[in-house]
Image: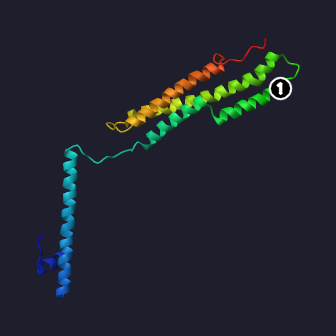
C-alpha cells in the first residue's frame, strides 16, 4: 500500500484539493479504497482455495425438519402403543352409544358386544391410526435424503430415531390389528 502524491490523488478523485487538510483526506480515502479492494481479493482467493481443497461452505437444508419428523414419528409410535386421549374418548363414546342402543331385554352376549366390544374396537382403531401415522412419517424421513441434496448424508441420530419410529409404528399397527380382530384380549364369552 503506497501513498499517492497530491497530484495523483486529485486525478483519481476528480476533485481538486485546496488545502493540506483536504489533501490528507483525499489520500486517506484512496488508501481505504485500495485496502478494501485488497480485502475483497483476499476473500476471493481464500474461497477459491477452500473450494479447491473440497472445504466449500455448507449450503442447503440444515436437516432440522428431518430431525423433527423423526422425533414426531417416534412419539406417534409411543402413543399408538400406550393409548391416546383421542382413543380413550372414542372408546368411552362408543361404550355410551352401546348402552343407549341396547335394551335391557337383549342377550348378555349382545350387551357385552355393544357396550364393551365396540368400545374396544374403537380404541384399537385409533391406536392403529396413530401407528400408521408413525410408520408413514418415519418412512418419509428415511426416504427424504434420496430426494434432497446429493452427497449430503443424513445425521446418524435422525436415522436412529426415524427407525425407532418405524419400528414402533409396525408394532403398534400389528397390535391394533390383533386387538381389532379380537385375537389379542378378545371379549369373554357370555356362556
Q: Position of residue 151 (x, y in %)?
A: 31, 36
The number of callouts visible is 1
Name the residue rendered at 64%, 30% in the picture. 126
Name the residue rendered at 83%, 28% in the picture. 100
Residue lying furthest right in this view? 105
Q: Position of residue 189 (x, y in %)?
A: 75, 13
Direction from residue 78 to residue 24 in the image, left or right: left
In this picture, is 63 found above or below 45?
above
Res 127 → quadrant? top right
Name the residue rendered at 22%, 52% in the picture. 47
Q: Position of residue 35 (x, y in %)?
A: 19, 67
Residue at which label 1 appears: 101
Q: Quadrant of the N terminus?
A: bottom left
Direction from residue 136 to residue 148 in the image, left or right: left
171 and 143: which is toward the camera: 171
Res 11 → quadrant? bottom left
82 and 114: which is toward the camera: 82
Name the residue rendered at 67%, 28% in the picture. 123
Q: Is residue 189 visible?
A: yes
Classify mark 1: helix, strand or loop: helix
Mark 1 burial class by Cα count in 10 Å: few <14, some 14-19, many 20+: few
Colour convention:
rainbow
Q: Position of residue 75 (x, y in %)?
A: 53, 36
Residue lying furthest bottom in this view? 19
Q: Is residue 139 visible?
A: no
Q: Quadrant of the C terminus?
A: top right
Res 90 → quadrant? top right
70 and 5: which is toward the camera: 70
Amino acid at each position: 500500500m503506497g501513498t499517492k502524491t497530491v497530484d495523483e490523488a486529485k486525478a483519481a478523485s476528480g476533485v481538486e484539493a485546496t488545502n493540506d487538510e483536504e489533501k490528507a483526506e483525499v489520500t486517506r480515502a484512496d488508501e481505504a479504497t485500495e485496502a478494501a479492494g485488497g480485502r475483497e481479493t483476499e476473500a476471493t482467493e481464500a474461497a477459491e482455495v477452500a473450494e479447491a481443497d473440497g472445504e466449500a461452505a455448507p449450503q442447503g437444508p440444515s436437516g432440522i425438519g428431518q430431525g423433527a419428523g423423526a422425533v414426531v414419528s417416534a412419539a406417534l409410535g409411543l402413543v399408538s402403543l400406550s393409548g391416546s386421549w383421542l382413543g380413550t374418548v372414542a372408546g368411552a363414546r362408543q361404550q355410551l352409544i352401546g348402552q343407549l342402543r341396547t335394551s335391557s331385554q337383549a342377550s348378555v352376549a349382545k350387551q357385552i358386544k355393544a357396550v364393551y366390544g365396540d368400545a374396544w374396537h374403537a380404541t384399537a382403531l385409533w391406536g392403529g391410526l396413530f401407528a400408521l401415522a408413525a410408520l408413514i412419517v418415519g418412512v418419509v424421513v428415511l426416504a427424504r435424503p434420496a430426494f434432497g441434496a446429493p452427497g449430503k448424508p443424513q445425521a446418524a441420530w435422525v436415522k436412529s430415531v426415524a427407525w425407532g419410529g418405524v419400528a414402533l409404528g409396525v408394532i403398534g399397527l400389528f397390535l391394533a390389528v390383533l386387538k381389532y380382530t379380537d385375537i389379542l384380549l378378545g371379549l369373554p364369552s357370555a356362556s
